[in-house]
Amino acid sequence: MAAEHQAVSLDTLYTAETPEGIALSLRPAGAAARALAYMVDLGVRFGLFMVVSIAAIPLGGMGQGLLLVSYFLLEWFYPVFFELTGSGATPGKRMFGLQVVMDSGLPVTPAAALTRNLLRAADFFPFLYASGLLTMLLRRDFKRMGDLAAGTLVVYADTVALHGQLPDAAATAPTRALAPREQAAIVAWAGRAKRLTPARLDELAQLARSVTPGQGGDATGRLLGVAQWLVGNRHDPRRTGERP
């Protein structure tokens, strides 16, 4: 479908669909932001380990056991603990505005958080997370192997905003059910309407004419109507063509 193709080629947004059928536009975080967040978390973990070390010195042999347990927990469960909080992010990820979500855009589950973090060992192979970095650079959604296995995604936490308000148009139902990626492409096109020339706007609208009712004439106006319908402006069923 033409509109779907546009969604893939014009931006790097990741479209997720919730169980309720709601399309979400997410912005995957790249390798640089994730690496910086990791360095911050590494510093936090090192600081916590130093605090435990100071407390363990007077405890002799028991202190050594405490250090081993602390190292294990900080290495494997530090990210799991923070990713299961409401923010879905470790302190480092919060600092850079990142969070971990499921592929559906929903909060990460305990099983997924465990899986993605236990597989950091595979991402580390053969050294310094080389495998994980290579995997991220080869994918549009920047997933490492742990994310692929767990079905998770690291995204920017801020809301994805349209480029502008949608132009006024009478809401019109599409001629068929649209996939989430198609819905996102049409709404994004409408949000950019004021930044495109009329000719370019109509050229793009022509590519999606299979989802607009009627043929010929004002393709831009018809697709703007579909965009209004997709964002929920369909209050009057007589205008929209919806069944009451």
Image (spheres, helix red, strand yellow):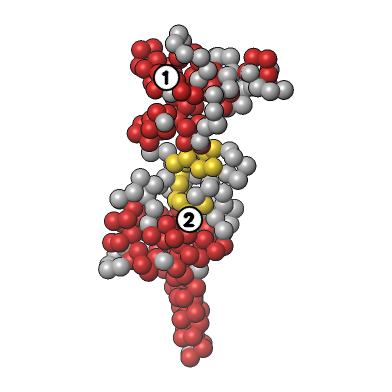
Q: Residue 100, percent across and down?
A: 49, 53
Label 2, on which residue?
A: 151
Q: Is residue 172 above or below residue 182?
A: above
- Which element carries disc 1, helix, strand or loop? helix
Q: Nearer the viewer, residue 75 or 23?
A: 23
- Quadrant into which the C terminus falls: top right
Give, as a three-letter code, the residue at label 1. Ala
At a point 49% along the width and 27% down the height, the residue shown is 187
Q: Residue 160, percent across and down?
A: 48, 35
Residue 11 visible, this angle? no
Binning the other alpha carbons within 10 Å of mark 1 as few (below 14), some (14 to 19) or many (20 upward) gives many
Q: Residue 172, percent across and down?
A: 58, 19
Q: Nearer the viewer, residue 44 or 73?
A: 73
Give, as a three-letter code, the residue at label 2. Gly
At a point 58% along the width and 22% down the height, the residue shown is 173
Residue 229 visible, this angle? yes
Front tag of 1 and 2: 1
| Relative horizontal placement of residue 234, taking residue 134 as reference (left or right) | right
Binning the other alpha carbons within 10 Å of mark 2 as few (below 14), some (14 to 19) or many (20 upward) gives some
Q: Which residue is farthest top?
A: 217
Label 1, on which residue?
A: 205
Q: Nearer the viewer, residue 226 or 59?
A: 226
Q: Nearer the viewer, residue 220 or 58?
A: 220
At a point 38% along the width and 60% down the height, the residue shown is 145
